[in-house]
Amino acid sequence: MFRILSRSLKAGIVTAKDPFADRAPFGFPVIDFEACTACEECVRACPTGALQADSPEPGRKTLSLSRAACIQCRECVEACPERAVRPGPELETAAYSREQLTERASFEVDGATGRASFRAMETLPGPTREESAAGLRERIEGRLGRSLHVRQVDAGSCNGCELEILATANPVFDLERFGIQFVASPRHADVLLVTGPVTRNMEVAVRRTYEATPLPRVVVATGACGCSGGIFREGTYASLGGVDRVVPVDVYVPGCPPRPQAILGGLLLAMGLREASGKGAR
Ligand code: SF4
Ligand code: SF4
């Protein structure tokens, strides 16, 4: 007994005062579009289709980066001959839609040389982060308060996301200090925290779990797979893709896997206790 007490005293308090203060050595890639020539080397290197190039009209090109689909593999950083893509330190990039996690740049193509140069950032359709936050706040107004019961649903994950979700409950991140608790049944839950691309075998289970959750039920799609299908892509023989292909999603927490502070940030976003940060077109 004495030994246990002395060990606890020696360990002290391990809980991080501000779990969001940490910065990752590699978060999501950051593109310096001014230096980018839209050569598409990064697009060819990207295994998930997070980087996309398009030529909507003659003399114009677009390049977009979707954090919803990015698995932070750094292939684009290595592939860029202009050194325009670099690793970013951002960890916490939860948002309310896939569009808010996407940035798209427009380029002008020189007819003589074929070289593209950056023109402007484009605005993607859909509500802004502020509009989405206000909509969600209105829906949950006075219903969730400062306590949140979460049911985690694995719709086909590799379990990487689950390991990070488990870490949110450890003494370092200690999600219970924010009033967040995991529960065993969707009937007791306010939020469904869904991981993995939705496999065809799990489609009905995800729908039923959603229907069993009492209103105003909030859905948080977790990980690149939950946000977009990730490395498993969408509409394959085994996988439908992102969670929003099956049930409506309120908050997207990208990353492969997202770190515990990103998951915590997403849950606080769902409670209306934190604002969305990070880059995106909206
Ligand atoms: S880091 Fe993201 S955007 Fe870059 S190649 Fe990997 S998945 Fe694609
Ligand atoms: S996002 Fe990454 S860690 Fe999470 S389920 Fe998909 S592959 Fe696994």
Image (spheres, helix red, strand yellow):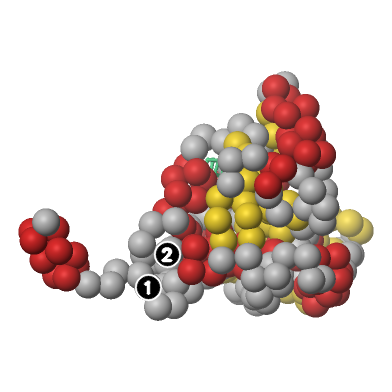
Residue at 11% across / 56% down in the picture?
1
Vertical side of 242 occupied by 117: above or below: below
Tell me where residue 200 appears, x and y as whole percent.
73, 25
Q: Which mark is residue 16?
A: 1
User: Hey, what amino acid is under mark 1?
Assistant: Ala
Q: Secondary structure at mark 2?
A: loop
- Give the class, few, some or many, for how many residues have Cα within 10 Å of label 2's Cα (few <14, many ≥20): many
In screen coordinates, is 66 left or right of 74?
right
**Could you tell whether 58 is left or right of 170 in the image?**
right
Q: Tell me if residue 235 comes above or below residue 272 in the rendering.
A: above
In this view of the protein, can residue 276 be seen by the observer? no
Q: Earlier in the sequence, mark 2 or mark 1?
A: 1
Q: Looking at the image, which residue is at 42% across and 64% down? A: 173
Answer with the quarter of the image where residue 187 lies: top right
Quarter where residue 39 is shown: bottom right
Q: Which residue is mark 2?
A: 173
Q: Do labels 2 and 1 touch, CB within 8 Å? A: yes
Q: Secondary structure at mark 1?
A: loop
